[in-house]
Image (cartoon, grey):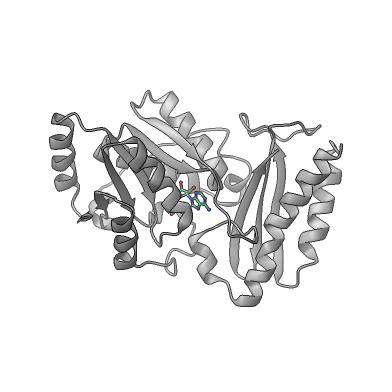
Amino acid sequence: MTKVIHSIDEMKKIIKELKKDNKKIGFVPTMGYLHEGHESLIKCSTSENDITVVSIFVNPIQFGKSEDLDRYPRDLERDRQICEKNGVDYIFNPSYEEMYPEGYKTYVEVEEITKNLCGAFREGHFRGVTTVVTKLFNIINPDNAYFGKKDFQQLKVIQQMVKDLNMDVNVIGCPLIREKDGLALSSRNKYLSKEERESALSLSKSLFLAKQLFESGETDPQTIKKKMEELILSYPLVREIQYIEIVDSETLKPKEKVEKGDTIALAVYVGNTRLIDNIQL
Ligand code: AMP
């Protein structure tokens, strides 16, 4: 039976008892509206730990002013059923006031690798992410924490933070889950109309094309990016390509010559919905 906990004190008390019993705790942080991408993280956690905690918290401080905080999809009962089905022990679902009470003043910031890719277009986003994840780690005190490679830059930023701040948690990156036709699963896919969903396939299609080009010998990033751009813009409901970058998977620095192991990441607006995707070569 999955228990839903709203209070930080109560969650900490439960964790303290579990730790007394030497239970290994797996943690999956999410913003809810769970899909098979989240489920795959949960499955990793339940198979590798005694107890799995999933947090569901739409973290306002990681959204920009003109972003989709207010319309972000939420459905706790639906999420609870998905957690139940997957053997989750606890959902941690605090309110905004619980996490950021009046007088809140502390933020965590990772430098450099938060400045390009999504960081260049979402000011303060990663500061919001690292702050909330630090708070959640302090509350849940997990042995293992699971993050999806769908948010490739986020995973790198969390790994860097955990290393730099000597946090006692093992960060595990899990594979990016796609629909059969290639679309990367995302809670934001709910925003897409049928026609927009068709155009949203441009992201994964362009990444698969890039991989093919690389595998047949192309190593010039500009050539690969140009061909990706052409493919994406051939879809009618693509409003804007925010970025396409080919970066070193560790440093996140742009590459002058593409090599095996590099990551191609992109952000594209389909209608009003901003979608991201990536592939590692
Ligand atoms: P979110 O609820 O979107 O903040 O995502 C919570 C976690 O699920 C993050 O670690 C994401 O990277 C991960 N996630 C989201 N979508 C996918 C996906 N399609 N495949 C794998 N992991 C995902």
Q: Residue 78, located in which quarter of the rendered image?
A: bottom left
**How many numbered tags mark residues here?**
0
Query: What residue lies at 40% left-to-right and 62% top-to-bottom?
Result: 33
Counting from the top left corner in percent of width and height, residue 42 is at 38, 47
Give the position of the C terminus as an image quadrant. Answer: top right
Tell me the quarter of the image containing the N terminus.
Answer: bottom left
Q: Quadrant of residue 216?
A: top right
Residue occupying the point 29% across, 67% down = 77
Residue with the most extreme bottom position:
194
User: Foreground residue, 50 or 118?
Assistant: 50
Of 154 and 218, the residue lying toward us: 218
Q: Where is residue 28? Give x, y as percent.
A: 37, 45
* Residue 83 visible somewhere in the drawing: yes
Q: Measuring from the top left, give residue 232's x and y in whole percent.
A: 76, 61
Residue 221 in view here: no
Q: Is residue 82 left or right of residue 239?
A: left
Image-based side of 10 in relation to 120, left or right: left
Q: Is residue 47 left or right of residue 241?
A: left
Q: Position of residue 270 (x, y in %)?
A: 65, 67
